[in-house]
Amino acid sequence: QKEVEQDPGPLSVPEGAIVSLNCTYSNSAFQYFMWYRQYSRKGPELLMYTYSSGNKEDGRFTAQVDKSSKYISLFIRDSQPSDSATYLCVRREYGNKLVFGAGTILRVKS
Amino acid sequence: SQTIHQWPATLVQPVGSPLSLECTVEGTSNPNLYWYRQAAGRGLQLLFYSVGIGQISSEVPQNLSASRPQDRQFILSSKKLLLSDSGFYLCAWGRDRSSPLHFGNGTRLTVT
């Protein structure tokens, strides 16, 4: 079983839609979670990181962690074609090990 | 602000040839440096990390090696490439071992 699971997609949505990207994990011990955005042929770009359960908001992006269900979500409001990318969910464990999901491909159509 | 540079962006090399990929970081001192490999449909795999000059930790035994000759320079090498070395190689830096990582734009290596 992969330690961090993501639906590979692609997820296709119309411009302006609210996007929900999800991630599940199997190991309860963690320091914090991160979301990275990766455009084609580019390196991952850090979007957000969150230490605790609940919501963290940054502009059009909201990260949500539900420890009880081991579920992590990234919401994108008013999605734009420029949001089309692969989104990586990452968990940092105690001991500083990073566990990467394989990513979800998002396509926002204008 | 900090920036990270990786080169080359793409590379095609024959089997058995040597490899040298370079990564440099600007705007910070004594960063933690990392080499990752990304395969399609899989999460990033940590290859090497370094907490200081000359200090290299290997996560995966393989055909590759890393060196850190200067504080903000990290090099990934191989003496003889294998077909299985093909992939997307990413360099990253972090302020310390518990900080989020910042990635370069990667090198697409194809071994033929």
Image: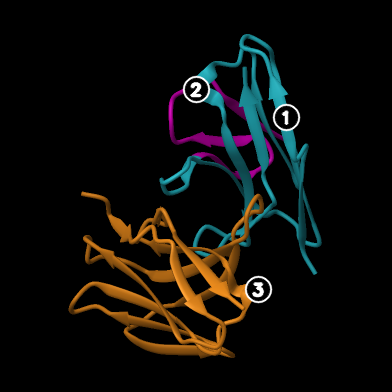
Are tags 3 and 2 found on a single chain?
no
Marked residue chain, label 2: B
**Residue B66 is covered by the magenta coloring:** yes
How crowded pointer 2 is (Cα within 10 Å; few <14, some 14-19, many 20+) is rated as few
How crowded pointer 3 is (Cα within 10 Å; few <14, some 14-19, many 20+) is rated as few
**Residue A95 is covered by the magenta coloring:** no
Q: Residue at x 55, y 74 (%)?
A: A108
Q: Label 3 amino acid?
A: Ser
B102 left or right of A23? right
Task: Give the residues drawn in magenta, as a range.
Answer: B47-68
Q: Which mark is residue A82?
A: 3
Q: Distance between the residues labelled 3 and 2?
A: 33 Å
The chain that appears orange in the image is A
Residue matched to label 1: B11
Q: Label 1 amino acid?
A: Leu
Q: Where is residue B91 in the image (x, y as percent from the top left)?
A: 64, 46
Q: Distance between the residues labelled 2 and 1?
A: 15 Å
Element at label 2 = helix
Q: Which residue is drawn at 67% across and 45% down?
A: B106
Element at label 1 = strand
A34 left or right of B23? left
Q: Which quarter of the figure is the C terminus of chain A placed in?
A: bottom right
Which is in the foreground here, disc 3 or disc 1? 3
Marked residue chain, label 3: A
